[in-house]
Image (cartoon, grey):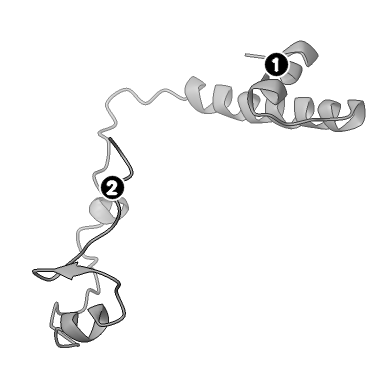
């Protein structure tokens, strides 16, 4: 896939961007370079390769270093809601914005 200068103009208009001619040409080269890389990746034969659910799934001996899930702070709901203009049953009340 290759973009044309007209494609860059259309994309700029859709994104509400304004490019001068040299900048538009630079964007054209960059985007076409990106599509060339994507084309090279699509050309790789991945037949028989299973997708990974996680990057470390290919290495069975790697243990993820996750910390224990413990409570480190106590509940301060009342203290945090003291500065709120309106609170009801522990919830912040806000003006209705959608009819």
Q: Say whether residue 42 is left or right of residue 82.
A: right
Q: Say whether residue 83 is left or right of residue 42.
A: left
Q: Say whether residue 16 is left or right of residue 49.
A: right
Could you tell me which residue is drawn at 25 percent across and 82 percent down? 82
Give the Cα separation between the discs numbered 2 and 1.
38 Å
Query: Which quarter of the rendered picture does the C terminus lie within?
Result: top left
Could you tell me which residue is drawn at 37 percent across and 26 percent down? 46
Could you tell me which residue is drawn at 82 percent across and 27 percent down? 24
Q: List x then y, in percent, for residue 5.
A: 79, 15
Instruction: Determine the image quadrant of residue 84.
Output: bottom left
Could you tell me which residue is drawn at 77 percent across and 25 percent down? 28
Q: Are marks 2 and 1 in contact (CB under 8 Å)?
A: no
Residue receiving disc 1? 10
How many residues crowd mark 1 within 10 Å: few (<14), some (14–19), many (20+)? few
- Mark closer to the chain start, 2 or 1: 1
Q: List x then y, in percent, for residue 31.
A: 69, 28
Residue receiving disc 2? 96
Which SS class for mark 1? helix
């Amino acid at each position: 896939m290759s973009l044309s200068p007209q494609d860059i103009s259309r994309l700029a208009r859709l994104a509400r961007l304004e490019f001068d001619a040299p900048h538009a040409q630079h964007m054209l080269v960059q985007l076409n370079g990106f599509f060339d890389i994507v084309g090279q990746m699509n050309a790789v034969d991945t037949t028989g390769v299973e997708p990974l659910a996680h990057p470390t799934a290919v290495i069975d001996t790697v243990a993820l270093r996750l910390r224990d899930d413990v409570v480190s702070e106590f509940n301060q709901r009342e203290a945090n809601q003291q500065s709120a203009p309106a609170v009801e049953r522990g919830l912040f009340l806000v003006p209705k914005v959608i009819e």
